[in-house]
Image: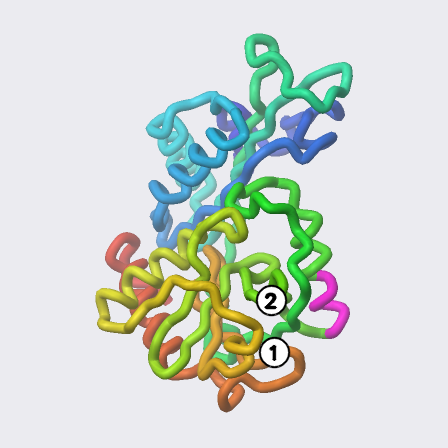
Amino acid sequence: MKVIWNNQLVERDTVVIDMEDRGYQFADGLYEVIRAYNGTFFTLDEHIDRLFKGAEKIDLILPFTKPELKNLLHELIKVNQLATGNVYLQVTRGIASPRNHGYPDLAVTAPVFTATTTTVPRDKEKMEKGITAITLPDTRWLHCDIKSISLLGNIMAKHEAHKLGKDESILHREGNVTECSSSNLSIIKDGVLYSHPDGNLILPGITKLVLLKVARKAGIPVREEVFTLEQLKEADEVFASSTTMEAMPVIEIDGVPVGNGQCGPVVKRLQELYTSAVEAQCGKIN
């Protein structure tokens, strides 16, 4: 299988990441996961824009322009014949020795970029059935808008859910719901879609933004405002959203069913609208 290593397509087993790479030692880097359907990227521009915005926030000068990166990614999915699946890309600040917390001199330390493909079918069964979740305090850092490769807080939250046989952890700060361990979260109450506004406490999810856009276009009322744990528990419907999950119904929280414990009508409509948006770019999908 081919991967991207810096600015070249190479065989995966030829890639060597130095032990003093700052991504390895400090988690000093960024990542993106981009979805492809029928061999065509969905929301590629939005993901690349977010990567560049994240790089600006951490003073990281990327080793390519947006068009150059897009061309590389198109070549990658073509050579690997990726139909429906994901491209994971990552860029670190590079190799610097001796180890030092300060940013290295950009003139002598070049970023290290990698990208891989993985075939991942749509999980239609889970999107119909839904997932279960627990609630946990959000103890992560205060720059969640940066898609950092430093994900230990998210991993710990996900693990707590898995220890209880659940799928996700819904995070909150002082009773205000932020997002899940690996997805955004929204609720439906009396036909209105509520979603946490973008800011430093959540990741500006590309899928979330697409869903808000198609919801508004379809006449579904949308309010981008903070909602509480109490509002979460009283919601008619709850759903998580991410690049790989699309619009995923949450049917149980802390052991209590959401609504009737099934995917609700508004979430079903959002799934249909999202599918239509994908098919407008990528063609008919299953």
Residues at badges 1 and 2 in contact (C-beta under 8 Å)?
yes
Q: Is residue 98 above or below residue 286?
A: above
The location of residue 89, given as percent across then percent down, is 52, 38
Whether the magenta-drawn stretch holds residue 12 is answered as no
> Tag count in the figure?
2
Residue at the image point whose x is 49% and y is 22% from the top: 61
Residue at the image point whose x is 64% and y is 16% from the top: 104
Q: Quadrant of residue 27?
A: top right
Q: Amino acid at mark 1?
A: Ile
Return the residue at label 1. Answer: 253
Q: Amino acid at mark 2?
A: Ile
The location of residue 124, given as percent across then percent down, is 46, 72
Magenta stretch in the rendered image: 159-164
User: Can residue 147 be seen in the rendering of this structure?
Assistant: yes
Image quadrant in which the N terminus is located: top right
Residue at the image point whose x is 73% and y is 61% from the top: 159
Rate crowding at label 2 as few (under 14), some (14 to 19) or many (20 or more) other CA atoms within 10 Å. many
State the residue lying farthest toward the top: 107
The location of residue 60, given as percent across then percent down, is 52, 25
Name the residue nearer the viewer: 8 or 105.
105
State the residue lying farthest toward the front: 174
Image quadrant in which the C terminus is located: bottom left
Return the residue at label 2. Answer: 170
> Tag 2, which secondary structure?
strand
